């Protein structure tokens, strides 16, 4: 697997913790309860999938590279569209969120499929 994937996974983790702290300490005073919940969903998915990226990077399995890429793109589209919507109220951002969710699902599906293929070889 690419050597920079560990850096990417670490960066996603770092940013996820920073954005979680930002939401918990600063945004809680600025956002409505509903918007803060939307922001928290973004942080939750962001951090969970940052850990998945870390595991994939540490596995060193080349056949999981596509999974890594789809999950990284999924975090960007899913979580960051929720962050943007929660902080700005710009409605069209929520139309990006399902694309991110789809990328996350594809990433998970590829983990299953590629791993299954490896056991059949």
Image (cartoon, rainbow, N blue to C red):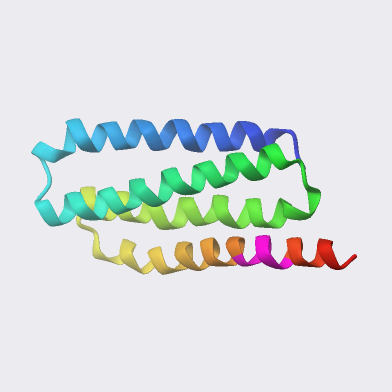
Dividing the picture into quadrants, the one containing residue 85 is: bottom left
- The residue most toward the front is 119
Observer-nearest of 52 and 106: 52
Which residue is more in the foreground, 24 or 113?
113
Q: Is residue 64 left or right of residue 83?
A: right
Residue at 17 percent across and 32 percent down: it is: 26
Residue at the limit of the structure toward the right, as seen here: 121
Would you say 29 lies left or right of 49 here? left
Rendered view: 111 above or below 76: below
Image height of 115 relative to 76, above or below: below
Counting from the top left corner in percent of width and height, residue 103 is at 54, 63
Does residue 108 sit above or below 37 in this rendering?
below
Measured as percent of width and height from the top left, residue 73 is found at 55, 54
Query: For residue 112: magenta?
Result: yes
Q: Which residues are magenta?
A: 109-113
Where is residue 17 drawn, in percent x and y? 37, 33
Q: Which quadrant of the structure image shows residue 91?
A: bottom left
Judge whether residue 2 is colored magenta: no
Horizontal side of residue 21 vs 81, given as left or right: left
> Image height check: is 23 above or below 80?
above
Residue at the (67%, 60%) spot, across then down: 111
Residue beneath the point at 33% across and 61% down: 93
Q: Quadrant of the C terminus?
A: bottom right
Dominant secondary-structure state across the stretch colored magenta: helix
Residue displayed at 47% across by 51% down: 76
Q: Look at the image and tell me in which quarter the N terminus lies.
A: top right
């Amino acid at each position: 697997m690419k050597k920079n994937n560990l850096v990417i996974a670490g960066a996603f983790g770092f940013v996820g913790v920073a954005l979680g702290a930002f939401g918990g300490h600063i945004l809680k005073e600025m956002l409505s309860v509903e918007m803060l919940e939307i922001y928290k969903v973004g942080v939750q998915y962001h951090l969970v999938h940052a850990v998945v990226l870390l595991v994939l990077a540490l596995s060193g399995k080349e056949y999981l590279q596509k999974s890594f890429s789809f999950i990284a793109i999924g975090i960007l589209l899913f979580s960051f569209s929720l962050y943007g919507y929660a902080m700005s109220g710009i409605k069209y951002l929520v139309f990006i969120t399902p694309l991110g969710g789809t990328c996350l699902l594809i990433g998970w599906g590829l983990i299953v499929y590629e791993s299954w293929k490896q056991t059949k070889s």
